[in-house]
Amino acid sequence: MARPTSTARRELGSELRRLRGERRAADVAVALGWSESKLSRIETAHTGISDSDLDRLLTAYGVRVEERARLRELAGRGRARAWWTPYRSSVPDPYDEYLALEAEAARISEWEAQVVPGLLQTDEYARAVIEVGAGVGDPDTIQRRLALRMARQVVLTREPPPVLEIIIDEAVLYREVGGREVLRRQLARLAEDSLRPGLTLLVLPFSAGAHAGQTESFMVVEFAPGSRGPVVHIEGLTGGLFRVKASEVEVYREALDDLRERALSEEESRTAIAQREEALRLAAAS
């Protein structure tokens, strides 16, 4: 699968910085008749680069013509519009970065203590979550964010789809986001999704007691071998935070190990979801 726009642009920028080696950016820019800031923006992935400018730059670096095809392909993708471009004005900048990571992911492992994760939310449940989000009050912004969240779920049907492991706290089954009926329909959707190939859905029961994920919800995003290292994403009130240092990623992997060990089995989790959905259905009928 081709890497998405912003990821391709970052990869190209890193490669061009490597090729520059010990050359001073100012000297390269002067030789090409560019400003130093133009070269800097290309290397830091803040802007794309045309094929003609790329050829001039690679000639300056002594890169042979037959070795340029991969870099041209990256440059082309870097100039393309990402599928989420129409929604960018309604989300914080870090979320744009998260979307690129999610689109490229080979595996996503997520712990969520408050709500159903976005990739598994129904439309009405997602709206209820978005409407109470910090700094969200404009109806148009709410609608764009809702459309974006629903569009993100296409990652579940791409080829090949990412491997998903999602662990939710039992409290998620009881928190009446959007009201009882909205929650009931959301749980019915979860029960269906729990049967999806490549998805492991686990429930951490109240009886698990203290655990390693008490302080925050998070996800670990992993990529195809040889592409890039894993990234931890933590959602905050004003945007997402990222952790990429190996030592920090390992802390979150160990937390996932603890949560996985304490969680119900897949079958037990599926039963817990179904029983809670049935209880809500019976309460509504009584």
Image: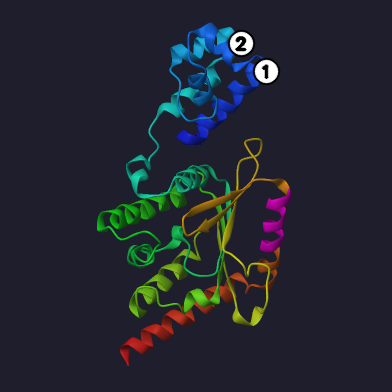
- Relative to residue 211, is residue 250 depicted above or below? above
- Per the image, is 231 magenta? no
- Is there a contact, CB below 8 Å, between mark 1 and mark 2? yes
Q: Position of residue 166 (x, y in %)?
A: 56, 62
Q: Position of residue 186 (x, y in %)?
A: 40, 70
Residue 237 circle label: none
- Visible residue check, residue 110: no
- Relative to residue 238, is residue 49 depicted above or below? above
Residue 61 circle label: 2
Q: Position of residue 13 (x, y in %)?
A: 55, 26
What's the colour scheme?
rainbow
Residues drawn in magenta: 247-256
- Residue 5 located left or right of residue 87: right
Q: Position of residue 134 (x, y in %)?
A: 40, 62
- Relative to residue 51, is residue 284 depicted above or below? below
Residue 21 circle label: 1
Label the magenta part by its dominant secondary structure: helix
- Residue 194 located left or right of residue 179: right
Of residue 272 and residue 169, the one placed in the foreground of this image is 169
